[in-house]
Amino acid sequence: MTALKVHTLTQLLSLERPKMMYYLEPQLLSYGGSLFIYGRAGTFKSFLGIELMHSLASGTPWLIYNTTAPVKSMMLQAEQVEPMYQDRMLSYTQKRIAKPSDVSNNMLFTTSQNLKLDDYHGISQLEEAIKMHSPQVVMIDCLYRVIKSTTDVSSIGRFLDDLTRLSATYGTAFVIIHHPRKESDEDRGFDELTGWSGMANWADSILRVTREDNPIRLSLQWEKTKNAFKEVSNVNLEVSQDLLKFMVR
């Protein structure tokens, strides 16, 4: 059994710190941290995740929030077969990325519709990918496809425990895209969406996305920003579907 690492105060203060403590400011996504983006179907959550990935890769602002430097991310996409996701990324790249070669090495993708991260085999595959490619941020799109049940406390607990272990071992930050349970039309916030308050307690930051139509407008509201030094501004967006672009209102 490995003993706990115990430090004196001076030893703790002198430990080597990560080169970047936060990837998204103001203190929204940290080294080894976690961010949930959640909302109902049709709220452009996946495109918001792709846009965040592109912003991290280029070191440019995401919406009204700053990134600190170019960062390598890996997208684990579980909703579409790879040719369909390729089609999505072809469309996004043609409209939103002027020089793909400039960010290509910082934008990694893997597709699996049957990978489960609440069992040993699945989490081991993810760990091997992290060890091989060293992404600072892993994005998971979306939660309900990568665990057996979003209402089973043991399934969610195993999933979160393993992400915590990966964060502690490799410094990996996780961005998780999630949406409501389909059997309920009632919207009572993040606890209702997951079926277990432990997930909201585990997350560092939680961003809720809602939508209005004609024209398409999104409201992004921060429900939790554990590490932020002060209140974080919410943002309202108008969506240009032709340009796959979010315009701040």
Image (spheres, rainbow, N blue to C red):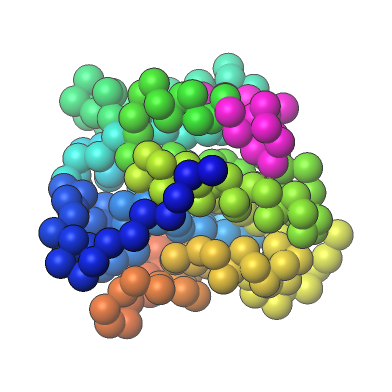
Q: Position of residue 175 (x, y in %)?
A: 46, 50
Q: Residue at x 25, y 39 (%)?
A: 71
| Label tally | 0
Q: Is residue 80 visible?
A: no
Specify the segment rendered in magenta.
110-124
Q: Residue at x 58, y 20 (%)?
A: 82
Q: Is residue 226 magenta?
A: no
- Residue at the far top: name it: 83
Q: Position of residue 21 (x, y in %)?
A: 23, 56
Of the pair 31 and 141, the residue shown nearer to us? 31
- Residue at the far bottom: name it: 231
Q: Is residue 120 magenta?
A: yes
Query: In which image quadrant can residue 77 be found?
Result: top right
Of the pair 65 and 13, the residue shown nearer to us? 13
Of the pair 16 and 130, the residue shown nearer to us? 16
230 relative to 197, above or below: below
49 relative to 201, above or below: above
Of the pair 249 and 43, the residue shown nearer to us? 43
Q: Position of residue 195 (x, y in %)?
A: 75, 66
118 relative to 151, above or below: above
Quarter of the N terminus within the rendering? top right
Query: In which image quadrant can residue 220 be found?
Result: bottom left
Q: Position of residue 173 (x, y in %)?
A: 40, 48
225 relative to 12, above or below: below
Quarter of the C terminus within the rendering? bottom left
Q: Residue at x 32, y 82 (%)?
A: 231
Q: Is residue 99 left or right of residue 214?
A: left
- Residue at the far right: name it: 183
Q: Is residue 155 visible?
A: yes
Q: Residue at x 51, y 63 (%)?
A: 203
